[in-house]
Image (cartoon, helix red, strand yellow):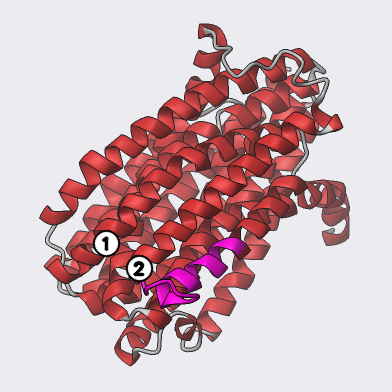
Amino acid sequence: MLTAFLNKYKPYYKDNLHLALPIVVSQLGHTLVHLADSVIVGHFAGTIQLAAVSLVNSVFMLILVLGMGLSYGLTPLVARENGRQNFDECGKLLSNSLIINFITSIILYTLVHFGSLLVIDHIGQSPEVVAYAKPYLAYLGLSIIPLMIFQTFKQFTEGLGFTKQAMYISVWGNVVNVIFGVIFVKGMFGIAPMGVKGVGLSTLIDRTLMAIVMVAYVMRSVHFKRYIQNFKFTFIDNIRSKQILKIGAPVALQYAFEISAFSGAAILIGTIGAVEQAAHQVAINLAAVTYMMASGIASAATIKTGNNLGKANFLDLRRSAIASYHVIIVFMSVTAIFFTLANNLLPYIYTEDQAVISIAAQLLIIAGFFQLFDGTQVVGLGILRGVGDVNVPTIITFIAYWIIGIPLAYVLGIVLKMGVNGIWYGLTFGLLTASILLFFRFQQKTKLLEEVY
């Protein structure tokens, strides 16, 4: 029976992984930027500045995922039109997406510059931590503009099934980020030590170079000539813009509800102390690595689902989606075991502060448990995005994280004085809720497609 089951899904495992692996590496690149920032600051600048990285990431990640979520609106549309062999439409969608994302990046930068930099003084954080956080946040805010340009062309190429190029650019971008980060933070080659501000500057340089290379690749590659014949940097129309925003805006909200819950948790932890906040940054950074890998598998599921929808191949659509669930369950089970067994060793990647390491080790055991729920919920969102179902999943994420997760985290961590562990228990329960509800939604939508067609 097991052999028959595996044979049924084996072709889909292979196809999904072939598409997903480059996306996983590319998605991982965004998180590795922040991981590298944390490692460099933790070793060369100390615990207080590491806490500043935690505070900034908790604020900036909300801005980042709003932009990235909006850019994801392009991918299922391009995948669907490519499935229909409507190549001209793909180029027109790219034009609209680029303008929307560029305008969005300016708005998000303005929010960082005039909003977050003012709010950060009034959320109960250590003044010492805030002083280091401000210049770092300013550089990250500016980096959202080139990042959104990069994301536009990345989502376009991935929607067409070209996933390796963005992966290579992300890998080299991270190498540049680490090299410049160490030089700026530590102070080398005649440059004065910049501390945490240095990793902000290195990230800005890295993202600018990535945007330039990605745009040049798409505009010059023979692979995309038939797709970009109707592409213009200034072309925008209401119909296509609404199509992109109809998917992208709810996806942005989905990510915002989840990431803002983690940001809210980081702020709650910051009211407990800088050591706890630094420990949270260590554990959440490691968990974010596996989450972004899961997000890559989810993006591949979106592409395959959208492509099968365009071909009206609903049997393959459902089987491919189920295969994505199988892959993520196996992958996240492995990472959960790894986090649990190596919980006392992994924090040393970031710091040698024993107080931070002790707390982070406890959090990594909890992270091991929520790996499964985090992975399955993001794959569920990816599949539903591929069939154009984004509004109900958005409501589900809001309920899971802000009606259940954060209130429970506050009660357990602050009211019942369970501390940082209690806050993480609340987040875990929110992820569990999202995972279950999204799976039920997936079953309902894909079975309905099979019955209708």
Q: Residues within 10 Å of mark 1 (few under 14, many from 20)?
A: many
Which residue occupies the extreme top position in the image? Answer: 238
Count of numbered marks = 2
Under mark 2, the amino acid is Val
**Mark 2 and mark 1: Cα distance apart in space:** 8 Å
Q: Which residue is mark 1?
A: 133
SS class of the residue under badge 1? helix
Whether 442 is drawn above or below 296: the answer is above
- Residue 139 position in % (x across, y down): 37, 52
Q: Nearer the viewer, residue 329 or 343?
A: 343
Task: Give the number of the disc on residue 438.
Answer: none
Main secondary structure type of the part rendered in magenta: helix
Residue at the location (11% across, 54% down)?
A: 122
- Residue 439 position in % (x across, y down): 55, 44
Question: Is-magenta flag for residue 240?
Answer: no
Q: Residues within 10 Å of mark 2 (few under 14, many from 20)?
A: many
Q: Nearer the viewer, residue 389 or 139?
A: 139
> Residue 350 appears in which quarter of the rendering?
bottom left
- Residue 353 position in % (x across, y down): 34, 89
Do we see residue 366 in this rendering?
Answer: no
- Residue 104 position in % (x across, y down): 42, 29
Mark 2–mark 1 CB contact (< 8 Å): yes
SS class of the residue under badge 2? helix
Under mark 1, the amino acid is Ala
Q: Which residue is mark 2?
A: 196
Q: Which residues are magenta?
A: 176-195
Residue at the location (35% across, 88% down)?
A: 358
Whether 367 is drawn above or below 29: the answer is below
Q: Nearer the viewer, residue 230 or 71?
A: 230
Residue at the location (71% across, 20% down)?
A: 90
